[in-house]
Image: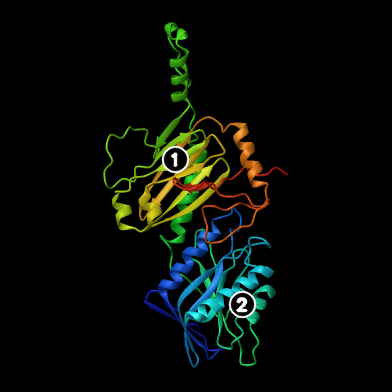
């Protein structure tokens, strides 16, 4: 049975089947979890796997993980963490640089988004080629949208072999924001409410006869009638923004939907992170908001349908807003589709400027002051 504890400053992994003892900084695993989840949400199905080098110390049979360095895999072989020839060369350079700084590479890590926790043949090649010492370790992390990330260490046996089919003992990292069950229930309720409460635009008011001679005024009235934002399903106009309200707002600019919230809300001051969920037609997109992202108070979402449901959850506070407006113009949808059809490399650690491979529809959320992550509608078979 492994001893695992992430509630303390230092955790420990030890199993009766192996003499090695692995200690780790809880902060390091929390930071790794953030990076893994960030990569997991970059693509709709499975995300992008990330990896890097574990740094620390070793003393006899004890290995201690104190820090890490991400490795920018070029993903030439797909969104998985599979290294190309150039990646292997770059990893050698990174390890030499770390050694020159007096840092000790005690092992390596990567996320495994599409399978159970195990070492694949390419993983074993990385392990043997770049981390051949008998005391060096591997850490695999498997993220989940609604449950805590699972993790498992891999070590070498006395004869140099590696048990690759599974870790001796897996363990779960602490929940990032709220219990997984609560988040899943909120998502289900949001989708159900959106299905039952799809807003219907009222017909535009009939202009007076005198307005026939004023086409500019008619155009302005029509533009106002085409945009309807319902805040929290309340139907009431808000004249103030109390600190205990998230005050979720939606504003559309030719398909660019600006999502805003009250940065001074009590929930935001008490919680360092939150979850933003966007239901755009039949597509659901999730975005973890951390630190500056949450404090900025706004992100921009490139919608692909006329009806969008947005849910923001910070701690125990949650608000929902619904947008109903005109469809996105066909030329713009075609530009989004053509941009997604150009195969480009996926580069980790750069979440706001990523081109997507042809078979992977991208997410569409971006921050207001950075380039958008474009996502086309689902491809038809």
* Residue 289 in the image: above or below residue 249: below
Please, what secondary structure does the residue beneath circle 2 have? loop
Q: Which tag, 1 or 2, sits closer to the chain's start?
A: 2
Q: Nearer the viewer, residue 260 or 142?
A: 260
Please name the residue that numbered disc 1 is placed on.
258
Q: Position of residue 272 (x, y in %)?
A: 36, 59
**Mark whose residue sits in front, 1 or 2:** 1
Residue 139 falls in which quadrant of the image? bottom right
The residue drawn where x is 48% and y is 78% is 55
Q: Position of residue 256 (x, y in %)?
A: 50, 38
Please name the residue that numbered disc 2 is placed on.
166
Question: How many marks can you see?
Answer: 2
Q: Nearer the viewer, residue 8 or 216?
A: 216
Query: Does residue 198 appear left or right of residue 342 in this picture?
Result: left
Please, what secondary structure does the residue beneath circle 1 have? strand
Q: Nearer the viewer, residue 39 or 153?
A: 39
Q: Position of residue 38 (x, y in %)?
A: 51, 59
How crowded pointer 2 is (Cα within 10 Å; few <14, some 14-19, many 20+) is rated as some
Query: Does residue 158 appear left or right of residue 320 in this picture?
Result: right
Q: Position of residue 317 (x, y in %)?
A: 35, 51
The residue drawn where x is 28% and y is 34% is 239
* Residue 92 in the image: above or below residue 213: below
The residue drawn where x is 32% and y is 53% is 267
How crowded pointer 1 is (Cα within 10 Å; few <14, some 14-19, many 20+) is rated as some
* Whether residue 139 is visible: no
Residue 258 falls in which quadrant of the image? top left
Indicate the quadrant containing the C terminus: top left, top right, bottom left or bottom right.
top right
């Amino acid at each position: 049975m492994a001893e695992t504890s992430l509630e303390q400053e230092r955790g420990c992994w030890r199993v009766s089947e192996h003499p090695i003892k692995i200690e780790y900084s809880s902060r390091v695993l929390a930071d790794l979890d953030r990076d893994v989840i960030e990569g997991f949400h970059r693509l709709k199905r499975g995300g992008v796997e990330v990896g890097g080098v574990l740094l620390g110390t070793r003393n006899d049979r004890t290995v201690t993980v104190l820090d890490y360095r991400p490795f920018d895999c070029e993903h030439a072989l797909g969104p998985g963490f599979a290294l190309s020839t150039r990646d292997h060369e770059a990893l050698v350079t990174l390890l030499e640089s770390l050694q020159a700084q007096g840092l000790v590479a005690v092992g390596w890590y990567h996320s495994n988004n599409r399978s159970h926790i195990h070492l694949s043949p390419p993983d074993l090649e990385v392990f043997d080629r770049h981390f051949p010492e008998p005391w060096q370790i591997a850490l695999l992390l498997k993220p989940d949208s609604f449950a805590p990330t699972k993790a498992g260490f891999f070590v070498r046996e006395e004869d140099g072999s590696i048990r690759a089919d599974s870790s001796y003992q897996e363990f779960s990292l602490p929940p990032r924001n709220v219990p997984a069950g609560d988040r899943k229930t909120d998502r289900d309720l949001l989708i159900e409410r959106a299905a039952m409460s799809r807003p219907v635009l009222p017909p535009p008011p009939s202009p007076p006869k005198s307005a026939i001679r004023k086409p500019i005024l008619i155009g302005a009235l029509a533009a106002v009638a085409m945009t309807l934002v319902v805040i929290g399903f309340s139907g009431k106009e808000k004249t103030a923004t109390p600190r205990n309200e998230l005050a979720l707002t939606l504003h559309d600019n030719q398909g660019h939907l600006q999502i805003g919230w009250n940065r001074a809300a009590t929930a935001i001051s008490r919680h360092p992170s939150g979850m933003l969920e966007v239901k755009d037609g039949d597509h659901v997109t999730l975005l973890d908001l951390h630190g500056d992202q949450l404090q900025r108070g706004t992100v921009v979402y490139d919608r692909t349908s006329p009806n969008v449901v947005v849910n923001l959850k910070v701690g125990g506070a949650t608000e929902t807003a619904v947008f109903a407006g005109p469809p996105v113009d066909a030329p713009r949808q075609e530009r989004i589709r053509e941009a997604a059809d150009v195969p480009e490399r996926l580069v980790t650690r750069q979440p706001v400027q990523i081109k997507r491979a042809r078979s992977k529809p991208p997410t569409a959320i971006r921050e207001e002051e950075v380039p958008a992550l474009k996502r086309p509608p689902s491809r038809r078979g």
